[in-house]
Amino acid sequence: MLDANKGDLGSQDARLDGSKLRIAIVQARFNEAITDALADACKAELAVLGVPAANIQHVQVPGALEVPLALQALAETEQFDALVALGCIIRGETYHFELVANESGSAVTRIGLDYQIPIANAIITTENLAQAVARQTDKGRDAARVAVEMANLLEQLA
């Protein structure tokens, strides 16, 4: 039986070895200060995990509802081992928050399943700007780690 935890990476386990991976990031520009911080944290963590900068493609779209279409286009190229969705949806006074959060989340999941590609969904949903700021760095790093770990897992399961 394969063990994804074994590897020769010193203190870093093999699940988080990104040295041979190609990752694409789709960033929504809406709430750009937050999504820029998410993207910066994600790219920094991908570098820590060994993903070469040349193997990272970063594209931007207007908002969270446009993220899935870009993810789908990237998945269709079959050039990537994993994708990352970045966005920030902050609750307002209307139902629009629920619509955007639910539809973008559902579409991201569907694309991952349809194309059998891991997608780390870091489209954060918060009640206010302070909550978004508090999550931006951790969620960006978490997304990088999820993308790398799931890409390696799917490679082993293939």
Image (cartoon, grey):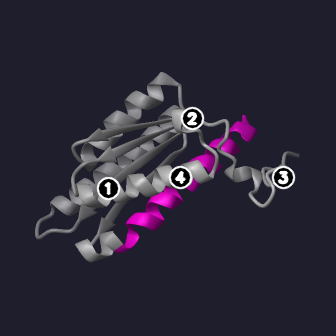
Q: Earlier in the sequence, mark 2 or mark 4?
A: 2
Could you tell me if the residues under marks 2 and 1 are in contact, i.e. CB atoms within 8 Å?
no
- Label 2: few (<14), some (14–19) or many (≥20) C-alpha neighbours in 10 Å: many
In the rendered image, the quadrant that contains the C terminus is top right
Indicate the secondary structure of the residue bearing disc 2: loop
- Tell me the kind of residue under disc 3: Lys
Give the residues drawn in magenta, as a range. 134-158
Q: Majority secondary structure of the magenta segment? A: helix
Q: Which of marks 2 and 1 is nearer the N terminus?
A: 2
- Tell me the kind of residue under disc 1: Thr
Position of residue 98 in the picture relative to residue 57 (left or right): left
Position of residue 31 in the picture relative to residue 75 (left or right): left
Q: Which of marks 4 and 1 is nearer the N terminus?
A: 1
Spot the residue most to the right.
1
Position of residue 7 in the picture relative to residue 100 (left or right): right
Q: Which residue is drawn at 71% across and 51% down?
A: 15
Rendered view: 111 above or below 123? above
Q: Quadrant of residue 107?
A: top left
Is residue 32 visible in the rendered image? The answer is: yes
Is residue 146 visible in the rendered image? The answer is: no
**Residue bearing the label numbered 3:** 6
Indicate the secondary structure of the residue bearing disc 4: helix
**Residue bearing the label numbered 1:** 35
**Residue bearing the label numbered 2:** 22
